[in-house]
Image (spheres, rainbow, N blue to C red):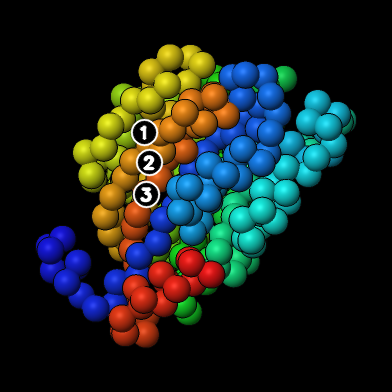
Amino acid sequence: MERALNERPWIMRFNVVTYNVHACRGLDRRICHIRISDILRACNADIIALQELDSDRARSRKVDQPQAIADALGMHLIFYSTDGWADGKYGNAILSKYPLKLVRAANLPGAGRCEPRGAIWAEAIINNQSVHIVNTHLGLTASERATQVRALLGPEWMGAHTFSESSVLCGDFNFSPRDPLYRLLTERLRDVQMVQRARRAFPTWLGLRTIDFVLVSHAIEVHAVHVHWSLRTRIASDHMPLVASISVPNARGTTAESDIESHSKG
C-alpha cells in the first residue's frame, strides 16, 4: 500500500518540525532566539510548531521571540499566549512557509494553580491543498493532561466536523508512549516515529525521554523522521527538534513536488 502511494504523481512532500525552545534559554543559560532560528533553518522546515516562547517579557529582554524567529526565517506566524501572565506573553506558535489561517486558539482545561496550557489550530494552504495543524503543550500532572487530551479530541478541536482529513497534531505532550493517553491519541492518529521506527528517546533536562510528538492522520504519508542533532541543538534548549518529512495528496491531481521544492528554497 505504501509503495503504491509513493508512486502516485499527486504526492506533495514537506517537512514539519516540533520544538520546545524553552524561551530560547539554553543549557549554557544564554537566551538567544537567533540560535534557535539558525537551528530551524538547518532543519529545512516548511511548517514549525514551537512551544515555550516569550514575548515582551523582562526575563527575555522584552524580545518578541515568535515574531523575531518568523522574521528571520521569512515565515508566516500565528502565536497564542495562554492567559494569566502579568509580565508579557508566553505560549506556542505555528510558523509556515505557506499561507496560514487561524481556526482556533484557546487555553485548555487546567487544574487548580497549574501553569495555564493552550493550543493553536491553523490551516496551511499548500499549493491549494488544505492541511490542518494543531500545536499544543500539555500539563505536568496526569489529571490535567487527561482533561486536555479529551478536550483536544472533542468537538471544539479535532472532533469538529471542519477538521481536515489531512491533519497534524504536534507538540510537547509531557507523557511517554507508554501512557494510556498516547494510546488514546493513536487510536485516531499515527505517530510518525512509530511509522518510521525512528529513535524514540532523546535527551532533555529530565533525562532520556520521548515527550515530543508529531502525529498525523491516515491520509498523510510519512517518508522520514529524525531528531535534529548538532552541537548547537545540544545546548540551545532542553529539548531537541523533531523533524518529519511527510506528504499529502494534491487535490488538483498533478505533480506538486517540484512546486514544493521551489517554494521551500524561496
Q: Amino acid at mark 3?
A: Ala
Q: Amino acid at mark 2?
A: Leu
Image point (41%, 38%), residue name: 228
Q: Which mark is residue 190?
A: none
In the displayed structure, 24 sits above or below 122; it is above
Q: Position of residue 189 (x, y in %)?
A: 34, 49
Res 110 → quadrant: top right
Q: Is residue 192 visible?
A: yes
Disc 2 versus disc 1: distance between alpha carbons? Answer: 5 Å
Disc 3 crowd rating (10 Å Cα; few below 14, some 14-19, many 20+) is: many
Disc 1 crowd rating (10 Å Cα; few below 14, some 14-19, many 20+) is: some
Q: Amino acid at mark 1?
A: Tyr
Would residue 258 be found to the left or right of residue 48 on screen? left
Decide which of tag 3 and tag 1 comes sooner along the chain. Answer: 1
Decide which of tag 3 and tag 2 comes sooner along the chain. Answer: 2
Look at the numbered discs 2 and 1 and tell me whether their residues touch, using CB distance below 8 Å.
yes
* Residue on which disc 3 sits: 244
Comparing 96 with 115, the one in front is 96
Which residue occupies the extreme front position in the image? 231
* Residue on which disc 2 sits: 185
Image point (34%, 25%), residue name: 201
In the displayed structure, 59 sits above or below 161; it is above
Comparing 260 with 154, the one in front is 260
Disc 3 versus disc 2: distance between alpha carbons? Answer: 18 Å
Would residue 63 be found to the left or right of residue 47 on screen? right
Q: Is residue 117 visible?
A: no
